[in-house]
Image (cartoon, grey):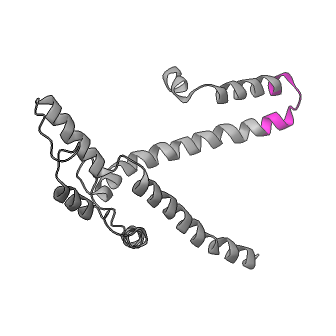
Amino acid sequence: MLAYLVRRFLLVIPTFIGITLVIFAITRFVPGGPVERMLAESQFVQEGTSQSQTVGDNSALDEYQLAELNAFYGLDKPVLEAYWEWLNKLLTLDFGESTRYYEPVLDMISERLPVSLFYGGMTFVIAYLVSIPLGYYKAIKHNSAFDTASSILIFVGYACRGMWWVSFC
């Protein structure tokens, strides 16, 4: 039993590394990062104020400004170096500043965490307060009308969209 627990705890390390690699790859290589969003916003502002003067091919910023932005967000570094720095910041709980709201990410998480924990906890409690007695009663009344009707209701409930349940309740 102890060997099993040790093996399971040792699996946490490669799982953590795998998850961080996937998250880093998504945030690094998927289009729509902070620099692209700033370029899109600046082009939108220019089009809205009918200024058609852009620097470069289709950019509102020159190459020096783009290089500064990439350096600020760490996009100019090699992938392994950038991943290592990102991982060290992650392990020290330095999540940086939001590129959308320009606030510290840890403050934003701590501000929203109580509400998420409340709803998550209530969902957990309600689900188990319903599912355990229902499963017990369905096992006692196997192949009865109650068993069939409750199974149909459960399948219909899974098939319905979540928003329908929220508006119904």
Chief SS of the magenta region? helix
Which residue appears at 24% of the width and 53% of the height? 103
Residue 111: x and y, percent? Answer: 31, 51
Relative placement, left or right, of 138 versus 41 is right
Residue 49: x and y, percent? Answer: 10, 30
Residue 125: x and y, percent? Answer: 58, 44
Where are the magenta residues, as a range?
A: 136-147
Which residue appears at 38% of the width and 68% of the height? 86
Question: Of all residues shown, which one is farthest toward the front?
Answer: 57
Which residue appears at 32% of the width and 59% of the height? 106
Q: How many marks?
A: 0
Decide which of 31, 149 is in the foreground and name it: 31
Decide which of 128, 21 is in the foreground and name it: 21
Decide which of 96, 138 is in the foreground and name it: 96
Relative placement, left or right, of 162 versus 38 is right
The image shows residue 152, relative to residue 8, as above or below, that is above
